[in-house]
Image (spheres, helix red, strand yellow):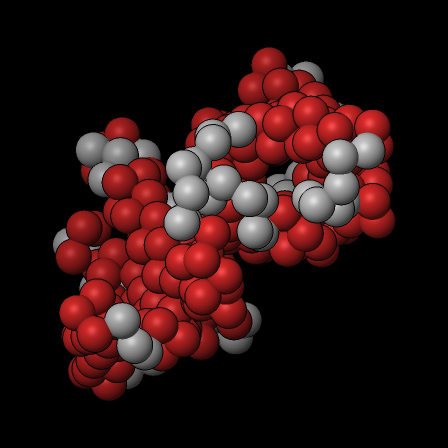
Amino acid sequence: MVFHPAVIALFMESVLISFMIFYSAYHGIRILRGWDLKSGSELQLTLERRTYLISTILTYLFGFQLISLFLYIFTADHLHTLFVGAMCAAGTLYVNANGYPALIMKVVNFLLAGLWLILNYADNRAYDYPLIRKKYFFLLIIAPFVLVETILQGNYFLRLSPDVITSCCGALFSIENGNVASEIAALPSIQMKTVFYFSIVSTAVSGIYFYRKGKGGYLFSSMSAVTFLVSLASIISFISLYFYELPTHHCPFCILQREYGYIGYPLYGALFGGAISGMGVGILMPFKDTFHRSRGGSASPR
């Protein structure tokens, strides 16, 4: 293991988040089993007080979960000087077999955490807890993913060895490499640009239609998810080339470095924020009528 302050902090944060999420999931099960808003029993009053605490804890935990994705990449990029062959986070994450799987799980959990926060926010806007069972059931789905992320990230950090010779981003994202990243980098530029701009326009049009007509929410949500995936592929395929001004440099990590003005952070922040916002419409659509009925009284935030 590389004993670096950022590595230790991330490792401890991941363990703490996993522990607290499973603690919250335990109480979520109790709420799912015993919740009855029409009851005035002592159990119901206890559950209502408990949900104030659990919702507050989870809001902060999932907020940290969102930040931890960027901290993980920043740390990997900062550590590249310790490994022979690495020039950015791409090489550092390739040091052992857990780096990229941990990154993928962090991306998945980033999206899940954002969707839970949207669901929780909508629930807090109503007065009669209309989505409380849904959001705690969703929490039970998220908890195992967070645990897998913690295990992968822990194994990645624990098995970091400065003696390992890794590959640079030029080799990993080279068209001749033969891996998934190289296949994306090798996608024809014209066709990829066409798909990218078409997905952007389609998402914008479906979003405007949903905003004005109140219909097509699932379409907008689906297009947001598709655009997110297409955009990630486009960054590797052709967008990164404009930042590097090199026709063969397809790395999606180097744009996070200082020499490029850290432009990658607002770029990825906008991309992930847009994906969560768009997909959040889809996760709220099944409860649209329930939510409208619940808004009949005054909201009591918790």
Q: Is residue 127 above or below residue 109?
A: above
Q: Which of 133 and 67 is in front in this view?
A: 133
Q: In which quarter of the image is residue 31?
A: top right
Residue at image position (62%, 19%) is 9
Q: In this view, does 215 lie above or below 235?
A: below
Which residue is farthest top? 5
Q: Nearer the viewer, residue 237 or 222?
A: 222
Q: Where is residue 225 in the image (x, y as percent from the top left)?
A: 41, 68
Residue at image position (28%, 48%) is 270
Q: Nearer the viewer, residue 52 or 68?
A: 52
Q: Quadrant of the N terminus?
A: top right
Residue at image position (21%, 74%) is 213
Can residue 70 be seen in this snapshot? no
- Say whether residue 27 is left or right of residue 37: right
User: How many numbered callouts?
Assistant: 0
Residue at image position (31%, 39%) is 265
Q: In which quarter of the image is residue 174?
A: bottom left
Can residue 182 be seen in this snapshot? yes
- Say whether residue 47 is left or right of residue 82: right
Q: Where is residue 98 in the image (x, y as percent from the top left)?
A: 70, 48
Q: Where is residue 105 in the image (x, y as percent from the top left)?
A: 62, 52
Q: In this view, does 283 lie above or below 30?
A: below
